Amino acid sequence: MSAVSNPATVAECLRVGAGFSQGDRNWIVEHFATLDARLAAFHADATELEVSVKDREARGQKVTLECWIAGRQKIVTTSGEEDLRAALHDARDDLRRRLNDAKTKQEPRHNKHIREIGQPGRDQVADADTDADLERADAETA
């Protein structure tokens, strides 16, 4: 697996949309910092995040977090939590889960198969070699 030369970070990729000011950006970046580990697998140039809030601090406010990664479908997460901080955390956690799900879907099937059945241990490999040697000996004597 190749490492990304310029990994995406929340601080680099986040835009604040409707309902937030540029002054809120640093506060939001701090709350979204746990996304950095998940975003590091993608190039910063090909990743964008946007957070917005509708009816901020009112009953029925809605926080929306959108994520665009080149070559993948746009991911949109929302939260209707009444507390702004809780709504941001809810949207962030949902995005992290959806990024994990998207990564799992993109993995090659043969890797998934190896994980499920496990790799053969030394004993299994040695038994297979012994069986092959016995088959060759039987074939030579026949």
Image (spheres, rainbow, N blue to C red):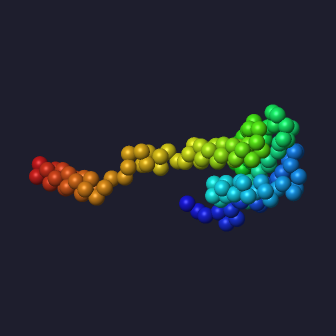
- Does residue 66 appear in this view? no
In-front residue for pair 41/85? 85
| Residue name at image x 55 percent, y 60 percent | 1
Residue 60: percent from left, percent from top: 81, 33
| Residue name at image x 42 percent, y 49 percent | 114
Residue furthest to the left: 141
| Residue name at image x 63 percent, y 58 percent | 37
- Does residue 101 appear in this view? yes
| Residue name at image x 14 percent, y 50 percent | 138
Q: Is residue 137 left or right of residue 111?
A: left
Residue furthest to the bottom: 5
Q: Is residue 76 left or right of residue 22?
A: left
Q: To which quarter of the image does residue 80 belong? A: top right
Residue 3: percent from left, percent from top: 61, 64
Q: Is residue 31 left or right of residue 132?
A: right
In-front residue for pair 136/66? 66
